[in-house]
Amino acid sequence: MTPNTLKDRSEEYRSIRLRIWCAVSLMLIMASGLVVRAFFLQVVHHADLKTQSEGNRIHLQTDPPVRGLIYDRTGRILAENRPGYTLTLIPERVEDMEWTLQQIGQLLDLGDKDIERFRKRARQARPFNDVPLITRLNQQEIALISVNLHRLPGVNIEARLLRHYPHSRITTHTTGYVGRINDRELQHLDPALYSGTNVVGKTGIERFYEKALLGKPGYREVESNAHGRVLRVLRHVPSVPGRDLSLYLDLDLQKTAVRALKDKRGALVALDPKTGGVLALVSSPTYDTNLFVTGISQTAYDALRNDINRPLFNRAIMGEYPPASTIKPFVALAALHSGTITTDYTIFDQGYFQLPGDDHRYRNWKRNGDGWTDLPTSIARSNDTYYYNVAVQMGIESLHDYMKLFGLGRVSGLDIASERPGLVPSPEWKKRTRGQPWYPGETVITGIGQGYLLTTPLQLAVATSIIANRGKVFQPRLVQPASTAQSGAIKPIAELQKDDAYWDIVIRGMRDTVSRPIGTAFRRIGKGLEYSVAGKTGTAQVVEIPRDIQEEKQRVLDEFHRDHGLFVAFAPIKDPQIVVAVIVENNANAPVPVARRVMDAWLLRNSNPANARKGPDSDKGS
């Protein structure tokens, strides 16, 4: 019988106790670690972790402002906002930006320029702000993106207001247009103000009044789930809409001017002489400004840029042309006010003028001359010889100073971008820019608006309004004052020396230009007028041609070498209601009928209730 082996119970108990002690120690260590960790998380790092937690749950969404509207003087809308759909991405929520852009590119027509533009905007924007990728989506594109949104985190389709110009080809160069913000603009625009906005005013009123039209963005604090879906709005700071603008511009008159020019290369400016308000401002030909709002295609832009007629060029404020004979009333007034001549100054014109000791003949446009010519006749007949004499007697320095008083050679201050100053030459200017002395013959031709002298159609309209107002100078404006009280307090910014006899005799010459058979505008405007008009024609030579062969050469010249035609006028004479300045390139006979049509539209409509109801251009053939 095998003896029983007795167990060592005490050793077994020690082993069990050791195991229990080790397990309990391990549990205590682990529990202590959890307590310490919880202390650090809940006490030491409480603020930081709370912020991170809120960041995962709460997001800021930009509330872009509504751009201000633009109206004409009667309340008809010229620039509005229409709803459209925009594809946006929130960089913070996009897991893989390159993959996401690739997927979108497979669904939509997404070009390299679109992607590059988006990346630049994304670098400027805050990570939680939405960045536009495609501004305007059509219904098919919306459907394609919508069915794929579940696999494109951070991608959204948003309803936004897009700029639209209902009369874009009529108000092309006045309202201007907005367009996508480019790289150069991104560098100086305030990211906070343009958060959620991807367009900026590029030309015209849209550019000049950008700050007023833009408004201020707001934001929303929204609570979202793990998938980015908005659950509720916690806080909303509304955006401040841009200011609406009302213009002096009359849409009907603007339409009349555009139709009268009929896509000829030229410009027309019509002013209210009592306020300086711009009633019409047209540069022709025009184009559709809506093409630029969401980004014009390169093909369409190249077609506009390379068009020989230069539709992108605003001739009304940027076109600098020799004023030709339209300068003569201003030269006459300058000579009178300076004491160079008197109201009864008369010359005998034999068809040319010569400087003392010089054999060169500066010819009158009428080869045989006009004989005895007084001041009113010199304006009506547009006699060159008379103003050759006057200019030489005044001298270029005096002539320069007086032309400046009429607003020539400097910007008028019109509330629109890119106005050019023109040029009133002087000996100092020529020495500084050409490094040459001033020659007496240059003074001679300056007196008839040729040589270095350059003006814009806007400047001619402003200068003519000074004559209409008998010396009162009003700054031209497109936008009306914000309040009625301000609009009733418009006052002249200056007043030239007043002598009624001087104004009377010059205005008489301008009236004879239109109303007497000797006048250069009589055949084209004088018949059937229902109101009095004071005007002055001008023909600016583009290619210098000897006077004795000019008429024959003109018939065969290439169109772009033909003379420019100009006409300035105001009406009615006793109580002027409108001032018009017109230039038509390479068509000397066109400006007068264009001006007549615009003045008829304004004056006959305002004086006849029936015409007011029909509106301008309601006649047959319009």
Image (spheres, rainbow, N blue to C red):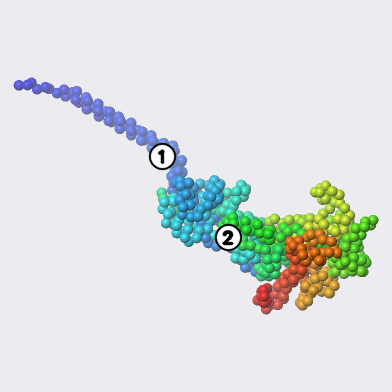
Tell me the residue at 55%/59% (across/down).
Answer: 162
Q: Could you tell me if the residues under marks 2 and 1 are in contact, i.e. CB atoms within 8 Å? A: no
Tell whether 128 sits left or right of 179: left
Tell which of 178 and 238 is nearer to you: 178
Amino acid at pointer 1: Gln
Residue 486 visible in the current orientation: no
Residue 208 visible in the current orientation: yes
Tell me the residue at 59%/52% (across/down).
Answer: 181
Tell me the residue at 7%/21% (across/down).
Answer: 2
Residue 399 is tagged as none
Tell whether 452 sits left or right of 194: right
The residue positioned farthest toward the left in the image shown: 1
Tell which of 248 and 223 is nearer to you: 248
For disc 1, the marked residue is 42
Q: Position of residue 258 (x, y in %)?
A: 68, 67
Mark 2–mark 1 Cα distance, whole angstroms, equals 51 Å
Among the 4 quarters of the image, the one containing residue 11: top left
* Looking at the image, residue 49 lies above or below residue 167: above
Please state, as top left, top right, bottom left or bottom right, where the C terminus lies in the image: bottom right
Tell whether 195 sits left or right of 501: left
Q: Position of residue 619 (x, y in %)?
A: 68, 76
* Looking at the image, residue 116 lies above or below residue 247: above
For disc 2, the marked residue is 163
Amino acid at pointer 2: Arg
Disc 2 versus disc 1: nearer the observer: 2
